Each structure stands twice: as C-alpha cells, then as structure tokens.
Amino acid sequence: MTETLPAAGGPSLPQERRVITAIPGPKSADLLARRTDACARGLGTTLPVFVEKAGGGVLVDVDGNSFIDLGAGIAVVNVGNSADHVVHGVQEQVAAFTHTCFMVTPYAGYVEVCEALNRLTPGDHAKKSALFNSGAEAVENAVKIARSYTKRDAVVVFEHGYHGRTNLTMAMTAKNMPYKNGFGPFAGEVHRMPLAYPFRWPTGPANAGPEALAAVISKIDKEIGADNVAAIVIEPIAGEGGFIVPAEGFLPGLADYARANGIVLVADEVQTGFARTGAMFACEHEGVVPDLITTAKGIAGGLPLAGVTGRAEIMDAPHVGGLGGTYGGNPVACAAALGAIRTIEEQDLVGAARAIGDRMLPALRDMAARHPVIGDVRGRGAMVAVELVQPGTLEPDPAATAAVAAFCHQEGVLVLTAGTYGNVLRFLPPLVMPAHLLDEALAVLDKAFASVPTSR
Ligand SMILES: *Cc1c(COP(=O)(O)O)cnc(C)c1O
C-alpha cells in the first residue's frame, strides 16, 4: 500500500496512513504540555500532534504516525508540502538576499508575482497588483483601494462571511465565537447582507438565488444607499462559514448590480483561489469578473504572502506611498509563489482539483444516502463539505460533527470543521493527494459516520 510521490511532488515520504501510538503519542503529549505553558491559550488546536515531516498527501508526527491530510494547512499547501519548485526557489532566494523592503529598493520577484496574478485572475482588462503578508491584510487593502477610488465609505459583506482577524476584517466577519467575542469595538460602515445559502433558504433551494439577490439589492438601496457603497466584498464560496456555494445566479447578479451602481466588486478568493475549486479562481465557475480579487493561502506553498489584483485604474487610485508595509511581498515568499504557480500550471492542478471533487462528491452523496445525519453534500473541486443535522430536519448537529472529526483523527485522517453552526466537516486535500489515500480517507469517514449516534 505504500507509494512514493512522482518527482515534483515534494519529499518522498511513504504515502500511507499509519497509526502506531495513541493520538497524541508520547512525544506529542510532551510538546503539548510545553505548548500549554509557553503559548497563549487563545491559539486553538484542531489535532494536537506535532508535525515532523509532510509531503504529498500525508503529515508525519514526531511519534511516527502518518496522517492523511484533508486540510492542507487550511487550503494553503495546494501544491503539497515542500513542493520541489517551491523548495528550490526559496533556497536560491534565501541565499541571495532575504529582504530589502520593496518600497525601498525593489527586486524582480515581486514584479513577476504581480505579472502572474494579473495574467491568471479573471478578466482580460488591464490589471495591476500589490502584495501583502496575510489574507486579512489583503482584504483591508482592497477596502482601502475601493474607498480611495470611489470616494465612498460603506462596505457590504454577507452572512456566513469570513475575512480575517484584524479590526476591520473582524467587523467584516459574520461569526461571533471564536472570532469576535470580546474584541470590539469594531470598524464602522460595514453592512451585512443575506447570502443565497441553498440548503437553508426558507422557501427552498430553487428560490435562494433570485430571492437573496432581491433582498440584498433592496437592503442596500433602503438602508445604505447605493451611492454610498464603496465595495461589495464576497467569498465566491463561503469558506469558514461552511463551504456554502451561493445559489446559481447570485454572484453574477451582484456583479451586475455593482457595475450599474459604480460599486467595486471584491472577490475574496483567499481560500478558493489557486486551483482549489477546479478552476484557477472560483469566480470563473459562473463567469464573474470581479473588479478586485484578494488572494493569499494557496499563493505561495505555505510561505506568508497575499495579493490584491484588479482593474488598473482602481488599483492606481491611492496616492504614491499610500499602500505597502515592511514585509509585504518579501523576496523569499515571492520565490515560493513563483514556484507554486509553476507547479500548478506544469502539473495541471486545476484538473487535479476537479478529479478530487469527482471522486469525493459521489462518495459523500452515497454516504448521505446511508447516514441520515448528513443533511447536505456540497462544494466544487477539492473544496468539499458535508453539513450534519438532526436526521430529517435542518437542526444543526455540532456534537455529531465533533464526534466524526475526533473519530477520523484517532484513525489517522486529519479533517477540519467549519460553519456558522459548527456542523460542517470540510475537506481541503492538497491537490497532489494520491487517489488511493483519498479513497482510504473516505472509507475511514464512512466508518466514522456509522460510529456516531445520530442525535444526542
Ligand atoms: C483565511 C481567510 C482570510 C484571512 O487570511 P489570513 O491569511 O488568515 O489573514 C480572509 N478571507 C478568507 C476567505 C479566508 O479564508
């Protein structure tokens, strides 16, 4: 059952699931005790094992356990851990120089990443980009740029949205616990609108698109005034909110409304970007061309980097010196991004993401037919989720969700949870995941669903 990776897929770790100790094992347990003493309590832990090596579809811990990775560091290592082009690019750059600050003395890598973003993002209009350190910072800068361009204040966001943990992006994020509770006051002029959430739309999934769009337009017109709105910021698939694919027509309708009213449409593709959904960017599935697009997570194979890309005249609105930051577009992170982008293109990871979805979605729908705790199966490409409910109802079942995740973790499969109601299991495998490991992970998941009581 062991299979090593093809040449460009990272270190040649055996591609196998292997549980040889209790989870966590003794070495992880020791480190966990030190972590508790040394690191702030506010930093959560999904699976308390300490990683020693990772590559392809596995994470190997300090006790020698090998986990099938269905998280990819939260949609970051789309190209796998330590992908060859990322490692080589970083090694060369780190030996040449590590930092100058792009605003002090520029370097080619930054420009090359911007050129790649301008080429790869949707739309054939003239584009420009700027680079930052994190997804939250990219979202903040997209809002700054949109406000500077429109000379308006208001920002429209959506229920179930997640945009980061800084002050403005907390205001833009929907969910209180754990992201916002006790951390206010939050930035003003942020207005939350209904999202076309098919599974939970009161009059049924078929009505979600048109009814949600009408509600959003009416609320903007009545409560804010379209002329006061600088930006509509939306994730093309809501990530932390539970992998909610908005009903068909909702995103194109918002794009039309934004265009008609001089509002900058910002697609937050921090989680959905870089081949994750079976397209380079998730907006492409409905042919939506955003004015600005924010990227991070999958951009650089795990090194911290983020970008804002968009229409040249919007990107050029802020005055000289109005954008930037000490580390944004760090040369080592840029080298990693160029390596990650090359890997995505050379290995057709867009196609690989589609193949992962084609394997996972039918298998999960088959499980849903046998396990009534599964209320909904959804996603695109390698961004797939199941929503757990009290059987036959829409009542969320976060306890069953936690139990299924815990079962998988004990059995050597890393899964993540999500969702406004804490009742979504989400799957984000690295796009280089070997097929036999994906099938094995699905088999473990099936056993996990069979093992949990369906209501408390
Ligand atoms: C993760 C995420 C962010 C925040 O990115 P950080 O790098 O953690 O700051 C913003 N938007 C979306 C959609 C995300 O998934």
Image: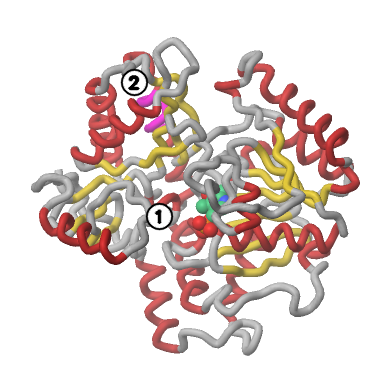
Q: Is mark 2 on a helix, strand or loop?
A: helix
Residue 10 at x, y = what percent?
31, 62
Q: Nearer the viewer, residue 160 or 184?
A: 184
In the current view of this chain or complex, which residue is farthest to the top? Answer: 392
* Magenta-span inclusion, residue 62: no
Find disc 1 in the rendering and name its residue.
Answer: 42
Q: In this view, does 332 lie above or below 203?
A: below
Q: Going 62% across and 44% down the picture, which residue do you hit?
A: 235
Left or right: 361 in relation to 124: left
Q: Nearer the viewer, residue 50 or 435?
A: 50
- Amino acid type, label 2: Met
Q: What secondary structure characterizes most of the magenta part?
A: helix
Q: In which quarter of the image is the N terminus?
A: top left
Residue 11 appears in the picture as rendered: yes
Find disc 2 in the rendering and name its residue.
Answer: 367
Q: Give the range drawn in magenta.
A: 358-364
Write down the quadrant of residue 439 in the picture.
Answer: top left
